[in-house]
């Protein structure tokens, strides 16, 4: 862990304490609608939808909200017309940034992402300029209150990729296809209070900055996340 644990704590708990929780739910609802479009809405038959629902649950999104998003996509699939776009670039100090968007207006979204990066000292790159620095992984985080040996034993038995003791947090990494199996293994063992539980992009290496520079980069990340069309922001800043 770097010296920026306060930023990690804010990031992990954002979905729980953010005053704009409704905005987070709207973004996830859009992801659910896209994943459910053209299907019967059964997550057991749609791995992509199942993963987004797990993300919704991880952010404490109410079950009714999840079901409404699914029903909207299944009943009115013609109204769900979002394009999935990824923008790649850099924040200040060479921090790689990957921004996933769902939008009904590509020009608007491109302008907003570009201007936000520029305003905060970053710049937009070309396709593939930073994506090679990340790998898609399942990530489960637990508060470090239990015995780490027990956590590690569960992780190994469930074929996790890695299990780390980061001081205040235990982090388990999985292959995307094995994420739900690993999560269920922990739930079956009585661990259900996850700080993080999702399939995401994890950087191969992280870059540590001073507190001041970390704050500047995190302000950029927050500004990007505040854009309505942005669904996810990935970066390699060590927080």
Image: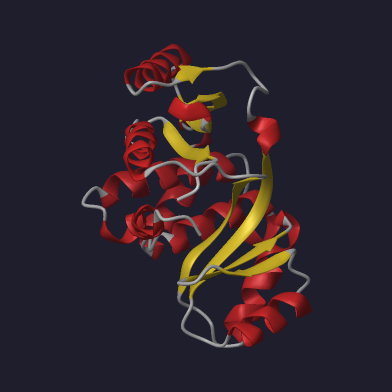
The quadrant in which residue 43 appears is: bottom right
Which residue: 39% across, 42% down? 210
Q: Is residue 137 left or right of residue 157?
A: left
Picture coordinates of residue 15 (x, y %)?
Answer: 35, 56
Which residue: 43% across, 47% down? 28
Q: Residue furthest front?
A: 210
Which residue: 49% across, 70% down? 169
Q: Is residue 41 visible?
A: no
Compared with 12, 216 (above or below) is above
Picture coordinates of residue 72 (x, y %)?
Answer: 44, 44
Which residue: 60% across, 82% down? 148
20 or 219, nearer to the observer? 219
79 or 135, nearer to the observer? 135
Compared with 189, 161 (above or below) is above
Q: Is residue 6 left or right of residue 231?
A: left
Picture coordinates of residue 203 (x, y %)?
Answer: 62, 44
Picture coordinates of residue 185 (x, y %)?
Answer: 67, 79
């Amino acid at each position: 862990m770097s010296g920026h644990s306060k930023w990690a704590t804010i990031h992990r708990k954002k979905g729980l304490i953010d005053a704009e929780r409704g905005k987070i739910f709207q973004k996830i609802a859009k992801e659910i609608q896209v994943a459910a479009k053209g299907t019967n809405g059964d997550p057991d038959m749609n791995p992509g939808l199942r993963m987004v629902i797990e993300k919704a649950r991880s952010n404490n999104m109410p079950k009714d909200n999840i079901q409404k998003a699914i029903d909207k996509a299944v009943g009115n699939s013609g109204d769900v017309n979002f394009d999935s776009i990824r923008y790649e670039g850099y924040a200040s100090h060479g921090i790689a940034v990957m921004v996933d968007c769902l939008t009904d207006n590509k020009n608007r979204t491109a302008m907003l992402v570009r201007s936000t990066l520029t305003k905060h000292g970053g710049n937009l790159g070309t396709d593939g300029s930073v994506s090679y620095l990340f790998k898609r992984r399942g990530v489960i985080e637990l508060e470090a209150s239990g015995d780490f040996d027990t956590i590690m034993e569960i992780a190994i038995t469930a074929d996790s990729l890695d299990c780390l003791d980061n001081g205040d947090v235990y982090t388990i990494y999985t292959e995307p296809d094995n994420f739900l199996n690993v999560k269920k293994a922990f739930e079956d063992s009585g661990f259900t209070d996850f700080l993080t539980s999702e399939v995401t992009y994890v950087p191969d290496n992280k870059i540590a900055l001073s507190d001041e520079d970390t704050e500047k980069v995190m302000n950029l990340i927050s500004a990007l996340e505040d854009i309505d069309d942005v669904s996810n922001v990935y970066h390699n800043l060590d927080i």
